[in-house]
Amino acid sequence: MENVDWAALPFNYHKTDYNVRISYKDGKWGEPELTQDEYISVHMSAPCLHYGVESFEGLKAFRGADGKVRLFRPDENGKRFAATARKLCMAELPVETFVEMCRMVVKANERFVPPYGTGATLYLRPLEIGMGAFLGVHPAKEFMVCVFVSPVGAYFKEGIKPIRVIVNPDYDRAAPRGTGDVKCGGNYAASLEAGEEANREGYANSMFVDAVHRKYIEECGAANFFGIKDNTYITPKSTSILPSITNKSLRQLAKDMGMKVEERPVAVDELSTFEECAACGTAAVISPIGYIYDKETGREWKFGDEPGKRCLEMYNKLQDIQYGRCDDPYGWTLVVE
Ligand SMILES: *Cc1c(COP(=O)(O)O)cnc(C)c1O
């Protein structure tokens, strides 16, 4: 691609050359196929349109300092994609096929992988939908998986900047035995209103607390949460939190840096004891949190306008691996050749 201000690209759909698709019919998967068609033909009676029979994933391809293109832990996304499918009674795409489709679509769109040093990346969006035509509420028998890509600019255009979040008692994201631990579109639809209200009131995101006790931190918008104190990386554990691959990777890096790691319920009350806290996910890697406001009680917590030392260290380490600037001791990256 020429004459593109890569760094300035928004997080938005940008047309590329190809996407890759595979269909499930008569009890089996076909073969992945590349297409230039940006549209999917869906019957008006398909369950993806009525009953939310839909799942998705999000991962990135990075152009490294050495010019190579790397995917970050695509097998983990593949496993989570299969776990979501199980929960929604959809056909499970084998992890190898998922990874192969990611590889194929990046290779076919290589000219859209942004140059090294721009902070821009190629975002991959895999999705699975229930197809066919029926009206009753029961699992679908036909499915389509599509993986498309879009170049996206750096998340933080002017360096990492801490965000402001609000704890709003008026909204729950997910129920303890619901679908909070899988990546389905329904969870996102259910969180939009809270996000819009947070934005209107000047916050980047709404911080969700658990739906039962309204006491424990769950997620920060569509990202996981962690706090740091006493040389310990602490992240909430709950059945309604989406298991973030970024969080999983940061837990490993924290251990490697000599920190302890705890996964356990984290009460909102505990916020006052953290030295640093942040949201984490593929989009931004780490978004340090500078300010939290609890709408119900009026309490507020301030962590400052600059990212904390540990957050920065972990952010840099993870990016070094993603861009191939250091060893990859756990084999997290897959070079697309
Ligand atoms: C996708 C997602 C995350 C982040 O997961 P990563 O694998 O780190 O990108 C966190 N929370 C929710 C609700 C999500 O949907």
Image: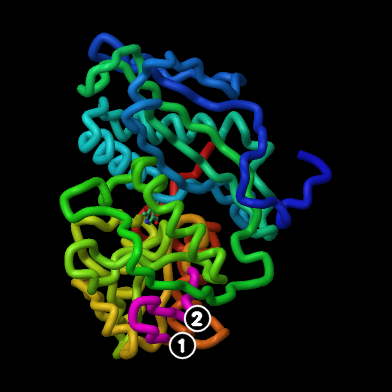
Q: Residue at x 40, y 44 (%)?
A: 74
The verdict on label 1 being within 8 Å of ligand 1 is no
Relative to 221, does residue 150 appear above or below in the rendering? Answer: above
Q: Specify the segment rendered in magenta.
A: 287-300
For the residues labelled 2 and 1, say whether their Cβ atoms are less than 8 Å apart.
yes
Q: Residues within 10 Å of mark 2 (few under 14, many from 20)?
A: many
For the stretch drawn in magenta, the main secondary structure is strand
Which image quarter holds the N terminus?
top right
Q: Amino acid at mark 1?
A: Lys
Q: Name the spot of residue 178 as percent of width and height, x first.
A: 21, 47
Q: Name the spot of residue 250 as percent of width and height, x first.
A: 36, 67
Q: Residue at x 36, y 33 (%)?
A: 54
Image position of 287 (left or right of 137): right
Relative to 140, does residue 222 appear above or below in the rendering? Answer: below
Which one is in front, 200 or 205? 200
Q: Amino acid at mark 2?
A: Gly
Q: Which mark is residue 290?
A: 2
Label 2 SS: strand
User: Reading the chain from its start, which is encountered first: label 2 or label 1?
Assistant: 2
Q: Residue at x 41, y 57 (%)?
A: 222
Q: Quadrant of residue 278?
A: bottom left
- As for residue 293 lying within the magenta part, the answer is yes
Label 1 SS: strand
Image position of 21 (left or right of 139): right
Q: Name the spot of residue 243 as percent of width and height, x first.
A: 29, 55
Q: Which mark is residue 302?
A: 1
Tell me if residue 160 can be seen: yes
Gap between marks 2 and 1 measured at Cα: 6 Å
The verdict on label 2 being within 8 Å of ligand 1 is no
Q: Residue at x 70, y 51 (%)?
A: 9
Q: Name the spot of residue 145 as percent of width and height, x first.
A: 40, 26
